[in-house]
Image (tube, rainbow, N blue to C red):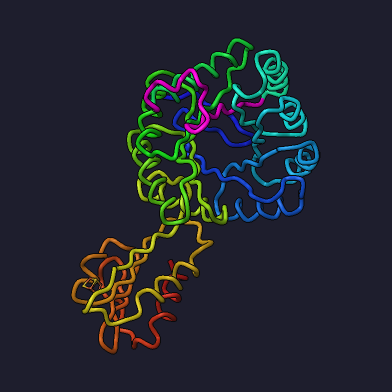
Amino acid sequence: MSKKVRIGNVTIGGGEAIAVQSMTNTPTKDAQATLEQIGRLAACGCDIVRASVPDSQSAVAFKEICAKSPIPVVADIHFDYKLAIAAIENGAAKIRINPGNLGGESKLKPVADCLKSHHIPVRVGVNGGSLDKKYLGMPLPEAMCESALEYCSMLERHGVQDIVISVKSSDVKAMVECNRLLNKRCDYPLHLGVTEAGLYTQGLVKSAIGIGALLLDGIGDTIRVSLTDDPVKEVDAAAEILKAIGKYSKPYVEIISCPTCARTEINVKELAEKVREYTMGVNKYLQIAVMGCIVNGIGESAHCDIGVAGGKDRSALFKDGKILAMVPNENLMKALLEEIDKL
Ligand code: SF4
């Protein structure tokens, strides 16, 4: 079991719920735009958000962002230890650094001291694409694991204990193997992600395989699905991965809809999309079925709380596997939504 680490008001590790993360892609120096994006991310279930702090203007804006954000904000820092200190002093709930590129132990020490005095954790980030030369002869999973553990030791030498590790690679297999190694060799919480995963479909598939495989083994405490897309879609994708393996901690509505075939009697896609939209804010776990035909539809979704199964002119509205009414197809959407309201 991993150690617990607090990031603002969110605790990860030690069996806590898996936290969903994303990263803003607005200029951090534009506090208003960044806060607007964080608001959208929080509204769709993001637990922790990261923002790059690449310069001093961004570090100044970061103070306002941290003060007004509804969720903990993590500062992503590269190269400049002074920016790491500025981000911590300006309210970062955590910083993400690569201790190897801050400029040596003399620059790491003041960062470590600042972390300790503000009681905030640090994420050690190792990326397969930017490993120290000394690891280049090793297989990638071992190399990333050794590099991450070396960075942890550097921080431990300066008395830092609240550490989260992320090792990311665009190579799904290497990322999975490396996290398995880290899970054996340390008890720091692990942040999982496949980096540079690509556009939506490719990124979703790579992330679902990499993150999903590890979570099914009980490895991983927080996740980010990296997509070349709106970060809101990252949060949505992360939530779907967690739901698919029964590790999503918040109540939600699951839509069970059939793939449609030659038996299909109703517009399953339109109905399912409407139900999804209608139930977006519902705060309890429900399963709602939208099935294309009565022949197989009711039997295959009898476990659902409520559902419809298409018929030629009239469709079955059913609850807990039993038919409530046969509804004319033109009234089906309305009847289903009314029944959902009663649940
Ligand atoms: S539920 Fe009916 S319409 Fe839908 S895929 Fe199955 S057989 Fe086809």
Identity of the residue drawn at 55% across and 33% down: 11
* Relative depth, front residue between 118 and 55: 55
Question: Where's residue 173, x and y in %?
Answer: 35, 36
Seen in the picture, residue 265 relative to 260 is either above or below; the reply is below
Identity of the residue drawn at 39% across and 32% down: 219
Question: Where's residue 110, x and y in %?
Answer: 73, 17
Where, quadrant-wise, is the C terminus in this rendering?
Answer: bottom left
Question: Where's residue 71, x and y in %?
Answer: 64, 44
Seen in the picture, residue 297 relative to 14 is either above or below; the reply is below
Seen in the picture, residue 233 relative to 314 is either above or below; the reply is above
Residue 94 in the magenta stretch? The answer is no
Residue 136 in the magenta stretch? The answer is yes
Question: Where's residue 148, x and y in %?
Answer: 50, 22
Span colored in magenta: 120-140
* Relative depth, front residue between 202 and 114: 202
Would you identify the image quadrant in which residue 93 lies? top right
Left-right relation of 338 to 80: left
Seen in the picture, residue 272 relative to 53 is either above or below; the reply is below
* Relative depth, front residue between 138 and 21: 138
